Image: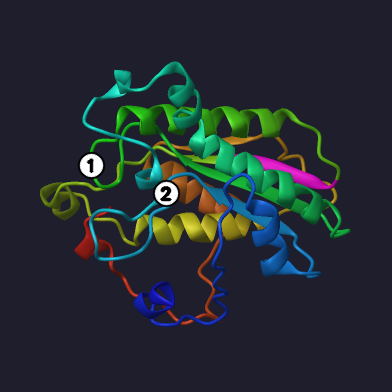
């Protein structure tokens, strides 16, 4: 409810309260989708909760951390903590891939990841850094798998986030980065058909020009049928 309120109750927003952690993903997917068809999935790594808060905004804050740094863990604790994000995405994919395969239509599974260079709210913890790279590994493995009727891709955003105020003034972006990435994800999903050759692709966004070219290539555009979302990125300083 808080998410809907902060986004000013946009049309066609469906909120799901649950968890995709191992052991809970199956129930969450069943409760949310029931018998409805699912054609496309966008799986975000380090997705940021859109809010004016500067901390506690994404799942990386659920990673185990403490004052002891990287070597505070026992070998057993490290094995669990270092793979938490990949385990979450694996549990979700295990439930969602069969769902989109059974839709009977060309489907897609798109990972959206960062470049591993740091956390949107500041420096990423050591264990968060390892988790980020584990997510890359899972994405790479899934992109190499052969899924019937499913195109699997990764969109890796290498543009800097949480830029200093001076840099945002000197090099302003025409639109919030989050909006462009959202539009591009929609374009990627809409581009999938029976003849798609995109399976396995890693699309790296290293600069604004690359982003603009991808938006054009995949015919991505703002959905005018949905009212505008509030632009909070200047307040949050996340771009």
Magenta stretch secondary structure, dominant: strand
Is residue 150 rendered magenta in the image? yes
Mark 2 highlights which residue?
Answer: 59
Which is more toward the observer, 41 or 182? 41
Color scheme of the displayed model: rainbow
Question: Which segment did they paint magenta?
Answer: 149-154
Q: Position of residue 24 (x, y in %)?
A: 63, 52
Q: Position of residue 99 (x, y in %)?
A: 79, 55
Q: Is residue 4 left or right of residue 151?
A: left
Spatial CA span between label 2 and label 1: 14 Å
Q: Residue at x 75, y 62 (%)?
A: 38
* Residue 74 placement: quadrant: top left
Q: Mark 2 vs mark 1: which is more N-terminal?
A: 2
Mark drawn on residue 28: none
Mark 1 highlights which residue?
Answer: 122
Is residue 33 rendered magenta in the image? no
Q: Position of residue 223 (x, y in %)?
A: 54, 73
Q: Residue at x 56, y 43 (%)?
A: 88
In which quadrant of the rendered image does the N terminus lie? bottom left
Marks counted in the figure total 2
């Amino acid at each position: 409810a808080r998410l809907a309120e902060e986004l000013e109750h946009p049309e066609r927003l469906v909120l799901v309260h649950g968890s995709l952690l191992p052991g809970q993903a199956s129930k969450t997917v069943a409760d949310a989708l029931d018998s409805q068809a699912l054609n496309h999935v966008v799986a975000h790594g380090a997705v940021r909760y859109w809010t004016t808060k500067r901390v506690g905004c994404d799942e990386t804050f659920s990673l185990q951390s403490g004052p002891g740094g990287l070597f505070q863990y026992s070998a057993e604790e490290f094995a669990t903590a270092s793979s938490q994000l990949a385990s979450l995405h694996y549990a979700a994919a295990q439930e969602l891939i069969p769902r989109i395969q059974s839709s009977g239509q060309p489907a897609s599974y798109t990972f959206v990841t960062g470049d591993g260079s740091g956390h949107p709210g500041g420096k990423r913890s050591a264990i968060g850094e390892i988790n980020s790279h584990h997510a890359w590994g899972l994405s790479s493995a899934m992109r190499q798998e052969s899924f019937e009727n499913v195109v699997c891709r990764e969109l890796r955003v290498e543009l800097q986030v949480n830029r200093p105020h001076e840099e945002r003034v000197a090099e302003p972006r025409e639109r919030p980065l989050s909006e462009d990435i959202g539009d591009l994800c929609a374009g990627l999903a809409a581009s999938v058909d029976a003849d798609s050759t995109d399976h396995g692709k890693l699309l790296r966004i290293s600069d604004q020009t690359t982003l603009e070219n991808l938006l054009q290539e995949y015919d991505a555009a703002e959905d005018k049928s949905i009212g505008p979302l509030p632009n909070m990125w200047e307040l949050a300083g996340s771009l």
